[in-house]
Amino acid sequence: MVLPAAVLLGLFFLWPLAQTIRMSFYDWPMLGEHTWVGLANYTSALGDEDFLAAVGFTLRYTLIATPLLFVVALVLALLVRGGSRAARGFQTIFFIPVVIGMAAASYLWMYLFQPDLGPASALGERAGLLDASENLFATFTSALVIVLAMVTWKVVGLQMLLLSSGLQSIPVEVNEAARIDGAGRWQAFRHITLPLLRPTLALVLVFSVAGSLLAFDQFFIMTSGGPNNSTITAVYQTYRTSFIQFELGAGAAMSVLLMVALAAVSALQMLLLRNTDNA
């Protein structure tokens, strides 16, 4: 019964992972012989200014996107907390963008803000906020804001659903007892709701951080790394190293370094859950 799943896991995860780790120790061009270089690819990646700049931008993007997604998702989860028909309807509306692929969502938002063509640019001009002929993807700040808006619209529905499930798991009697004892809404939220949501918050946090660290599609499609290579993420730089510069060994080393970072995020998740269990 388990064999088909085990075969798929081995073929599409374990073998590629082992091959990637193996390649990271070689000078592995796209064509030609590959030679053993040991840890040279790792030392080269850690000293590569382009890769370090990409990692720095990825971290900045993560620090912005993670709290943004969390706050919006929590607000939406609180708004649809009730079990009414209207609440379920809004919950469905907020969740619909999740089923859209990241590439499709990126192309959609890129079209919306196309100069002299996109509806959002035209509306912005009518409102006096921007010039419809201005290319908003040509400046770093506006390009990043559009990408963040797209990612929030695309992803926040899933986080809202997870937080809604966590809120529903909190017994109603606990909040009623707090109100009887004189606790206000903010006090009940801070001292009761948030502590009881810690396992769900840890899960949402890890999903958000992992997704931000692995960001690629939105920047590849919407900004192409511009302007002036300022929106190149770590995964994007790995792609460029592997499939544009054809240095597969160096790209594999970058991938392994990212995998280690994600493993650290998973360890943080387990730590948070363990602390919650011991609380």
Image: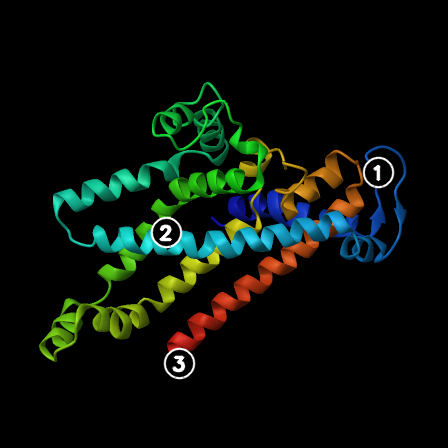
The residue carrying mark 1 is 29
Specify the quadrant that holds the C terminus. bottom left
The residue carrying mark 2 is 159
Name which of mark 2 and mark 3 comes first in the sequence.
2
User: From the viewer's perspective, is 27 left or right of 62?
Assistant: right
In this view of the protein, can residue 235 be seen by the observer?
Answer: yes
Q: Are marks 1 and 3 in contact (CB under 8 Å)?
A: no
Structural crowding at the residue carrying mark 1, measured as other residues with C-alpha within 10 Å and reported as few (<14), some (14–19) or many (≥20): some
- Residue 17 percent coordinates (x, y): 67, 49
The single residue placed furthest to the front in the displayed view is 128
User: From the viewer's perspective, is 92 left or right of 124?
Assistant: left
Amino acid type, residue under disc 1 in the picture? Pro
Q: Are marks 1 and 2 in contact (CB under 8 Å)?
A: no
| Depth check, front residue: 133 or 82 | 133
Amino acid type, residue under disc 3 in the picture? Asn
Name which of mark 1 and mark 2 comes first in the sequence.
1
Q: Nearer the viewer, mark 1 or mark 2?
A: 2
Element marked by disc 1: loop
Residue at 26 percent of width and 68 percent of height: 193
Residue at 52 percent of width and 44 percent of height: 4
Element marked by disc 3: helix
